[in-house]
Image (cartoon, rainbow, N blue to C red):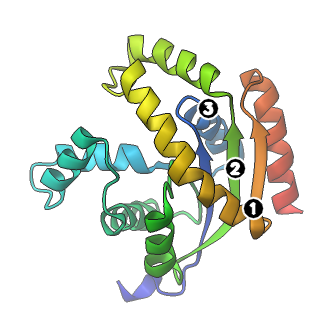
């Protein structure tokens, strides 16, 4: 597609520990501000269900092992979803998760997308675990259990926090207290978005 070479997408990364409220807030941002919500995890889960996908076995292996899928695959799925949506503004939830993700994003997407902001939902581990265990009763997600959660929180601390620090140095991070009510958090989010458009 040679027609989309001039299109520069606006991207807001949404980061935070498992259960910090990223998905809930993304839904509200999508309906209020018209950003398209792309979850890296959901895109990978959908891709692995496609029988014709060339990536499905590799994605399956990484999800089973709790390891991070190669960044080229994730970027390619994100790029495809952006082009398909024919929209300009995107929330990318749960990505970049580590330095490899960040380097890959910069390499693959540098001339395609501009990072406007990083929303960092900061929430105590104990609250995150309680929320995920509660969600696990109805979500059907195999990784919403105590063992998986300990590993996911550890990975987030070791791999994702340095990414947040990287963007903090670029003055792109808006840190939000995830340990408030959904409504209070969204009021804080709204202020960030009002600042973007001004």
Point out the image quarter for the N terminus: bottom left
Counting residues from the start of the chain, the first of labels 3 and 1 encountered is 3
Residue furthest to the left in view is 51
Dot 2: within a 10 Å radius of its alpha carbon, few (fewer than 14), some, or many (20 or more) residues? many
Q: Position of residue 103 (x, y in %)?
A: 48, 73
Residue 111 position (above or below residue 163): below
Query: In this figure, which residue is indicated by the disc labeled 1?
Result: 168
Q: Position of residue 100 (x, y in %)?
A: 43, 67
* Residue at 77% across, 31% down: 185
* Residue at 51% across, 77% down: 106
Query: In this figure, which residue is indicated by the disc labeled 2?
Result: 119
Q: Nearer the viewer, mark 2 or mark 1?
A: 1
Residue nearest the viewer, comparing 85 with 100: 100
Query: In this figure, which residue is indicated by the disc labeled 3?
Result: 20
Q: Are marks 2 and 3 in contact (CB under 8 Å)?
A: no
Q: Quadrant of residue 151?
A: top left
Point out the image quarter for the C terminus: bottom right
Q: Nearer the viewer, mark 3 or mark 1?
A: 1
* Residue at 18% across, 59% down: 55
Counting residues from the start of the chain, the first of labels 2 and 3 encountered is 3
Q: Quadrant of residue 52?
A: bottom left
Helix, strand or loop for disc 3:
loop
């Amino acid at each position: 597609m040679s027609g989309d070479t001039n299109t520069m997408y606006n991207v807001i990364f949404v980061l935070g520990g498992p259960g910090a409220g990223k998905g809930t807030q993304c839904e509200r941002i999508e309906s209020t501000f018209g950003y398209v919500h792309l979850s890296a995890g959901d895109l990978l889960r959908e891709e692995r269900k496609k029988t014709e996908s060339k990536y499905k076995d590799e994605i399956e292996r990484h999800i089973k092992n709790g390891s991070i899928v190669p960044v080229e695959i994730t970027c390619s799925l994100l790029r495809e979803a952006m082009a398909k949506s024919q929209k300009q503004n995107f929330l990318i939830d749960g990505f970049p998760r580590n330095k490899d993700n960040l380097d890959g994003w910069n390499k693959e997407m540098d001339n395609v997308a501009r990072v406007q902001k990083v929303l960092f939902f900061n929430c105590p581990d104990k609250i995150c675990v309680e929320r995920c265990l509660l969600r696990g009763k109805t979500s059907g997600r195999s990784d919403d259990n105590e063992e998986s959660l300990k590993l996911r929180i550890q990975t987030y601390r070791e791999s994702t926090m340095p990414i947040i620090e990287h963007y903090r140095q670029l003055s792109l991070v808006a840190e939000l207290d995830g340990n408030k009510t959904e409504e209070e958090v969204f009021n804080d989010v709204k202020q960030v978005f009002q600042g973007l458009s001004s």
